[in-house]
Image: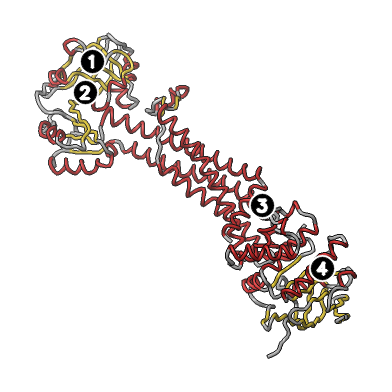
């Protein structure tokens, strides 16, 4: 009987092929659009997070106790060698960098801005967060005698400077005196991390030690791991070994970014509900018409001994075939599209001004997650199930003789 | 205890086609039928033939009265019981054939047997057997839309007979057939009645067809006007 029921369901769909194709296409298109949006929006969010991790905080940042409340040069991480040894021996750690940081001032003859001065090792930064990948103009280096400086793109705009121009960088040193140094702009970076692009000034670590008069210790150590799932565990390990330090994950340093991620998940859920609500209405319309125009046929089947449950099974089978076929088609289209944009990125240059305001890259790479497809499957199946409940209710109320005598 | 095979006891049926409008289709009808009979219910249009057949087959419920099939009451019972009854014990042949259009002739004939859960082999054998008797063995793989009226009606009869019901109810089975096809179909149904011992009750207003029955019942205005066993 199962085979016959499937045969009846399949034959009914084929008999009304244009209508069936319409529903399948509707589901497939809805799913395609939804998967694309989910992948791109999540891609945007993940890119923002990655930019922040790569350019600034890493996945875990270490500071001396009280540094974040009062970022003074007296609050330094002095155990940086021990920490380095620990990282070198931990296979979970992919890379780490040590930085000196201090608030300061960058000035030209005509303009000046408050900045964050970073004393860095450019080679280490390249291995760690690929800072070189953000280079917009100039070279990734500090030039002869390390007298160069790399600044953020927005800062360069505000100061109206370009490559080769002189910049006076000054800050309070460890003896609470103002120190200054004249440097030549060798590079301009755009990290799409707004704070960095507006205020970051990168100088050689040695030059920073001279400027700040801090021969030892660092202000910040940033870590990137091989696997995101190890973040909490590594954080706990560090806290056990170095309990006096402030050890924070990226989401603790950038709660707004975490909120963006959560918001995007909520947005995707709402979009899914809307899209599948619409698809469900489409299936409902088709199945309702299909049941109503076949009431006579169902009346005959009831008259010759078919139970309501068996007819219900036929209708559910039809609805399932429509939904599943649409799901497969939509998943294939959506998956292929996401795969393309995963590798090639989506060029949103026409929206560059707006995107840069929010710290987003103009080329967004899609994210592909298994949960997109599993959630979509559940949503499609729910939509197909719910959409036939009312037509089935009508069928249950039908009397076989009245149904057979319908014209 | 000896009881009739089919016992219709004081059946009345009132329809309410509109508010404050009622139509009495059947008035206090009492009839008995023995196992293996070949019966015709005849009368003018609107006499209540179809209504009576529907009630006897559990497709409709009477306003008053009872129907007992093989000693078991089939009126005022749950739809699930009626569904099983129609599946296992009663076969229907409708005036408009009423085959399932998306299934082939073979699949239509096998349909009720599959509802009964019979094996593939049994369905095949029985389908062949009834198809031979009804001269439709070469039409089994065709869809109803590819068959003539007479062929479709024979497939409908085959579907009704194949599941070995106790009772077949046929509502004007020859109404849409030409006279030659009608006579041929009635001869085949008579043969099935004699070979398989199935009780067949059909309605008609065709004198040629009526003459083939051994037990005839005349309905007029919802009442039994005559109940005879001609020849």
Q: Which residue is mark 4?
A: B186
Q: Chain of mark 1?
A: A
Task: Please tell me whether mark 2 sits on a helix, a strand or a loop.
Answer: strand
Q: Which residue is mark 1?
A: A141
Q: Which residue is mark 3?
A: A290
Q: Same chain for marks 3 and 4?
A: no
Looking at the rendered image, the disc whose residue lies closer to the viewer, 3 or 4, is 4
Q: Chain of mark 2?
A: A
Q: How is the image coloured?
A: secondary structure
Estimate the x, y position of residue A179 in percent, counting from the top left: 15, 17
Q: Chain of mark 4?
A: B
Is residue A281 in view from this perspective? yes
Mark 1 closeness class: few <14, some 14–19, many ≥20 residues within 10 Å: many
Please give the name of the residue rendered at 85% of the width and 73% of the height, measured from the top-left corner.
Answer: B212
Looking at the rendered image, the disc whose residue lies closer to the viewer, 4 or 1, is 4
Mark 4 closeness class: few <14, some 14–19, many ≥20 residues within 10 Å: some
> Which residue is nearer to you in this view: A48 or B103?
B103
Q: Chain of mark 3?
A: A
Do the residues bearing badges 3 and 4 touch, measured as CB atoms within 8 Å? no
Mark 2 closeness class: few <14, some 14–19, many ≥20 residues within 10 Å: many
Task: Please tell me whether mark 1 sits on a helix, a strand or a loop.
Answer: loop
Do the residues bearing badges 4 and 1 touch, measured as CB atoms within 8 Å? no
Query: How many angstroms separate mark 3 from mark 2 (CA)?
Result: 69 Å
Q: Is residue A259 left or right of residue B137?
A: left
Q: Which residue is mark 2?
A: A118
Estimate the x, y position of residue A329 in percent, counting from the top left: 53, 40
Is residue A389 in view from this perspective? no
Q: Same chain for marks 1 and 3?
A: yes
Which sits earlier in the primary sequence, circle 1 or circle 3? 1
């Amino acid at each position: 009987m199962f085979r016959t029921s499937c045969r009846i369901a399949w034959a009914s769909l084929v008999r009304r092929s244009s209508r069936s194709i319409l529903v399948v296409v509707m589901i497939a298109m809805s799913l395609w659009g939804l998967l694309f949006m989910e992948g791109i929006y999540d891609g945007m969010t993940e890119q923002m997070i990655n930019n922040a991790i790569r350019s600034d905080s890493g996945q875990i940042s270490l500071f001396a106790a009280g540094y974040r409340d009062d970022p003074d040069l007296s609050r330094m991480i002095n155990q940086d060698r021990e920490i380095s040894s620990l990282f070198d021996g931990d296979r979970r750690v992919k890379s780490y960098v040590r930085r000196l940081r201090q608030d300061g001032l960058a000035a030209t003859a005509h303009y000046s801005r408050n900045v964050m001065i970073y004393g860095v090792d450019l080679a280490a930064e390249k291995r760690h967060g690929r800072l070189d990948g953000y280079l917009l103009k100039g070279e990734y280096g500090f030039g002869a005698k390390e007298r160069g400086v790399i600044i953020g793109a927005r800062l360069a705009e505000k100061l109206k400077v370009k490559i080769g121009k002189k910049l006076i960088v000054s800050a309070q040193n460890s003896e609470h005196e103002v120190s200054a140094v004249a440097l030549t702009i060798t590079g301009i970076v755009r990290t799409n991390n707004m704070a960095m692009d507006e205020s970051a000034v990168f100088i050689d670590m040695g030059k920073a030690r001279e400027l700040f008069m801090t021969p030892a210790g660092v202000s910040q150590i940033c870590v990137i791991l091989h696997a995101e799932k190890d973040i909490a565990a590594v954080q706990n390990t560090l806290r056990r070994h170095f309990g006096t330090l402030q050890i924070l994950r990226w989401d603790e340093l950038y709660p707004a970014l975490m909120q963006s991620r959560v918001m995007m998940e909520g947005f995707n859920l709402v979009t899914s509900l809307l899209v599948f609500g619409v698809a469900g209405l489409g299936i409902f319309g088709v199945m309702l018409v299909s049941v109503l125009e076949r009431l006579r046929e169902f009346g005959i089947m009831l008259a010759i001994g078919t139970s309501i449950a068996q007819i219900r099974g036929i209708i559910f089978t039809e609805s399932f075939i429509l939904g599943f076929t649409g799901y497969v088609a939509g998943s294939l289209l959506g998956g292929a599209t996401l795969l393309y944009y995963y590798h090639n990125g989506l060029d949103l240059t026409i929206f560059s001004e707006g995107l840069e305001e929010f710290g987003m890259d103009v080329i967004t790479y899609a994210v592909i997650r298994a949960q997109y497809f599993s959630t979509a499957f559940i949503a499609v199946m729910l939509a197909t199930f719910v959409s036939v409940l009312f037509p089935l209710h009508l069928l249950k109320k039908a009397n076989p003789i009245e149904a057979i005598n319908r014209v | 205890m000896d009881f009739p095979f089919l016992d219709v006891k004081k059946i009345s049926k009132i329809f309410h086609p509109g508010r404050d409008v009622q139509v009495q289709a059947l008035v206090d009808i009492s009839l008995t039928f023995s196992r293996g009979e070949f019966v015709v219910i005849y009368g003018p249009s609107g006499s209540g033939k179809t209504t009576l057949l529907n009630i006897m087959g559990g497709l409709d419920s009477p306003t008053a009265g009872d129907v007992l099939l093989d000693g078991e009451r089939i009126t005022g019972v749950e739809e699930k019981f009626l569904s099983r009854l129609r599946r296992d014990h009663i076969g229907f042949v409708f005036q408009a054939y009423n085959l399932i259009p998306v299934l082939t002739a073979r699949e239509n004939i096998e349909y009720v047997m599959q509802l009964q859960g019979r094996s593939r082999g049994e369905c095949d054998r029985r389908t062949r057997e009834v198809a031979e008797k009804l001269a439709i063995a070469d039409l089994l793989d065709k869809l109803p839309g590819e068959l003539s009226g007479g062929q479709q009606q024979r497939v409908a009869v085959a579907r009704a007979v194949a599941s070995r019901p106790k009772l077949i109810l046929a509502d004007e089975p020859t109404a849409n057939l030409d006279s030659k096809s009608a006579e041929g179909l009635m001869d085949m149904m008579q043969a099935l009645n004699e070979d398989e011992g199935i009780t067949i009750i059909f309605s008609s207003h065709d004198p040629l067809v009526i003459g083939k029955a051994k037990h005839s019942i005349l309905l007029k205005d919802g009442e039994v006007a005559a109940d005879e066993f001609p020849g």
